[in-house]
Each structure stands twice: as C-alpha cells, then as structure tokens.
Amino acid sequence: MTNARKMSLFDRNDEMTAAMVNEARRLLDIRQPQSVLLSGGNSPCDFYRALGQENLAWAKIDLALVDERWVDEDDDGSNAALIRRTLMANGANEARFTVMKTDAATPHLAEAEVDSLYRALPQPSLSILGMGPDTHTASWFAAAPEYEAVSCANATQMVAGLSAPRSKVTGNYLQRMTITGAMLKLCREAFLIIKGSDKITLLEDCLSSPAKSSPISRAAEILGPRLKIFALRGEG
C-alpha cells in the first residue's frame, strides 16, 4: 500500500500530539527564514496549541494557510481565526501570518494578489494537511470545476480560487481559496493528521488506489516520501 510504512498509529491523542510536536521541532528549530502552511478543522487544534508553546524562533517563521473559506475572521468558518486562537495564542504570535482572505468579492478575483504573497514566502518547511470524509484535502474537491487545475503539481499559480460543490462537508462555504499542487510540491515535509478508524480505513483505500482517484491520493503522490501520516485510532 502506498505510504503505508509512513503511517504512525496512536491510541492516545496526547501521545500523537507529542510525537508531532517533536517532529515539527526538528524541522523548525533552525535560525533561518522558513514558512509553515496550516490547515483548518478540528483535527490539528491540539497540535497547534502545543506547538505554539514551543520556544522556536517564531519571528523568523512565516505562517500561511493551506486553504480558506471566503469569509471574514468573525465568521465561525474562518481558518485564519482558528490559527490565531490556537497556534498563535502564545509565543507563536511573533510569527508573521499571511492570510488568504482579501476584500475582493470572490476568491477568483483575489488570485493574483494572494499568489504574489505566497510566492514571496520562504520555502515551506512544513505543511499540515487533513482529509475529509469525501477524501478532499486542502480545498481540493473532486467535483469542483477547478479541481484538475488546482491539484496539478505543475499548476501555474501557487494559490487559486475554487467553487466547491454543495455537500454535507462544504455546507454553505462554497467559495474557497486553496494552495495548488505547485505550492504543495515546494514543501520539505507534510504532516497528514487523521482521527478515527473510519478515516484510517478510507485513507488506506485511497492510498492503495491510483493517484488520480482522489484528492488525498493526488497530494500523496506529489509529496511522496515527504508525507508523514499521524493517525489516531479513536476520535480523540
């Protein structure tokens, strides 16, 4: 099974969090400019809170988002707001944070502006990814009209606007900005955080199928051995 040997399984959330923090320290405990790309959702929150308390050179670390719903930070769906109240609640507030949401009416109208910001970031040392029950990662939704373009490793842009399909997963948050496969390709390493036996089984099925069969398998193909999977058998 593709990537199976890189899946670390845990029975306790605190043990998995500690393991991820140790791995992240290895990547980030250097005194040179670098960036970290961050996903939203519930799964990484404990890791973010713990990492934010680490004594790292946060002033030399740029934080940026993997994807964002096209809402302001006072909306419950804002990934930027989640990062501010978890990772950036302590010492990590010294880091520079590049958000995706602008004043543009749609993410598509903001592509050029946000793409310029992401091209100016130092090379990402780490990207944090998740996987939805529909196998999406970042905001790569297979039924979106922009899916082929955004998930391509040779995409011409680092970020792109996307119109997600309405579903139980997306809800009313259909307008999104996401990194492309080209941006993901630049990452030195990526952590994929999975919680729950059902998701572990789903991920195993995806990674044993052709890369084009799901968004998460496309991301895994782009990253290759740079992808590290942290999986919790329970829900937390």
Image (tube, helix red, strand yellow):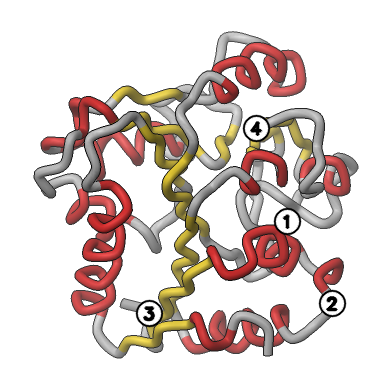
Mark nearer the N terminus (4 vs 3): 4
Q: Secondary structure at mark 1?
A: loop
Q: Depth check: give the residue in front, 174 or 34.
A: 34
- Whether tag 2 and tag 1 are in contact, CB under 8 A, the answer is no
Give the CA distance from mark 4 to mark 3. Answer: 28 Å
The crowding category of the residue bearing disc 4, from other C-alpha atoms within 10 Å (few below 14, some 14 to 19, many at least 20), is many
Question: Where does the C terminus fall, quadrant-wise?
Answer: bottom left
Q: Residue at x 49, y 58 (%)?
A: 190
- For mark 2, what is the residue? 210
Disc 1 residue type? Ser
Residue identifier under label 4? 177
Which label number is shown at residue 167? 1
Gap in angstroms between the C-alphas marked 1 and 3: 22 Å
* Residue 165 visible in the displayed image: no
| Earlier sequence position, callout 2 versus callout 3 | 2
In screen coordinates, is 139 left or right of 74?
right
- The residue that label 3 is drawn on is 235
Give the total of numbered labels: 4
Mark 1 or mark 4, which is nearer the start of the sequence?
Answer: 1
Q: Quadrant of the N terminus?
A: bottom right
Tag 3's secondary structure?
Answer: loop
What residue is shown at x 63% (from left), y 60% (from top)?
Answer: 223
Query: Residue 228 at what x, y percent from top left?
Result: 47, 70
